[in-house]
Amino acid sequence: MTNDSTRPEFWDPRYKLGDMPWDAGGVPKPLEQYLRQTHTIGRVLIPGCGSAYEVKAFADAGWDVLAIDFSVAAVTRAKKLLGDLSHCVRHRDFFKFKSPKGPFDLVYEKNFLCSLPPDFWPRYASRMRELIRPGGSLAGIFFHGCEDEPPPYPITDPQAASLFDTSFVLSDDQPMPEESRWQVWIRKSSRSGDPEYSS
């Protein structure tokens, strides 16, 4: 079993064995509140979706939802759990994924960033600039705690500012249990030097 969390081989055996301490078993309350309060709906992407509990919550709220994961075992589990909504889950690599319909209105972050080592974070931020339309949102759960044996890899406020401030504005920031934060980052309007959608 590899210790490299950037490889599907890290995640597949854990999903197969049910060794998933990160799996919350349902939809987090801040997302439920966000969906109740957000009147604008559109297309949402859930990268690194894992068990994909949130797919039904988004679909029930009227969103056109697509969930992706590069772990075959995770996708298999998610499809089984979702039943009639299993078509919303695809086996895709976030860094290679191409959206046939163009950028999304929202990307839901469910502790996907903290599964990646920090040297992958600039690539993550670049992909978010490509995948989210100007005025769209990156919203979800970001891990800001401490971890002696990552993953998860916690992020600090200065690191988040370095990744997102040039292209996003932080519009919501709420504490959550276990040193996580619910945050909403709004994609700034396109400008010179800010990459356009290219996938």
Image: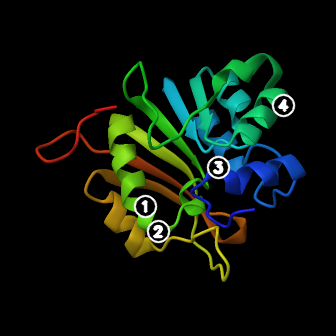
Of mark 2 and mark 4, the one earlier in the sequence is 4
Q: Label 3 to label 2, Cα distance in Å?
A: 18 Å
Instruction: From the top left corner, tell me how far across and down residue 181 is, in percent.
Output: 59, 62
Q: Residue furthest right?
A: 17
Q: Label 2 to label 4, Cα distance in Å?
A: 31 Å
Q: Amino acid at mark 2?
A: Pro
Q: Label 4 to label 3, Cα distance in Å?
A: 20 Å
Find disc 3 in the rendering and name its residue: 8
Of mark 3 and mark 1, the one earlier in the sequence is 3
Compared across the picture, whether 163 is left or right of 71 comes to left
Find disc 2 in the rendering and name its residue: 118
Residue 143 makes an appearance in the image = yes
Checking the image for residue 121, the label placed there is 1
Q: Quadrant of the N terminus?
A: bottom right
Asked which secondary structure carries label 3, the reply is helix
Q: Amino acid at mark 4?
A: Leu
- The crowding category of the residue bearing disc 1, from other C-alpha atoms within 10 Å (few below 14, some 14 to 19, many at least 20), is some
Find disc 4 in the rendering and name its residue: 81
Instruction: From the top left corner, tell me how far across and down residue 34 is, in percent.
Output: 60, 41
Instruction: From the top left corner, tell me how far across and down residue 101 is, in percent.
Output: 41, 19
Q: Are marks 4 and 3 in contact (CB under 8 Å)?
A: no
Q: Is residue 86 above or below residue 81?
A: above
In the depicted view, which residue is nearer to us: 191 or 5?
Answer: 5
Q: Is residue 69 above or below residue 22?
A: above
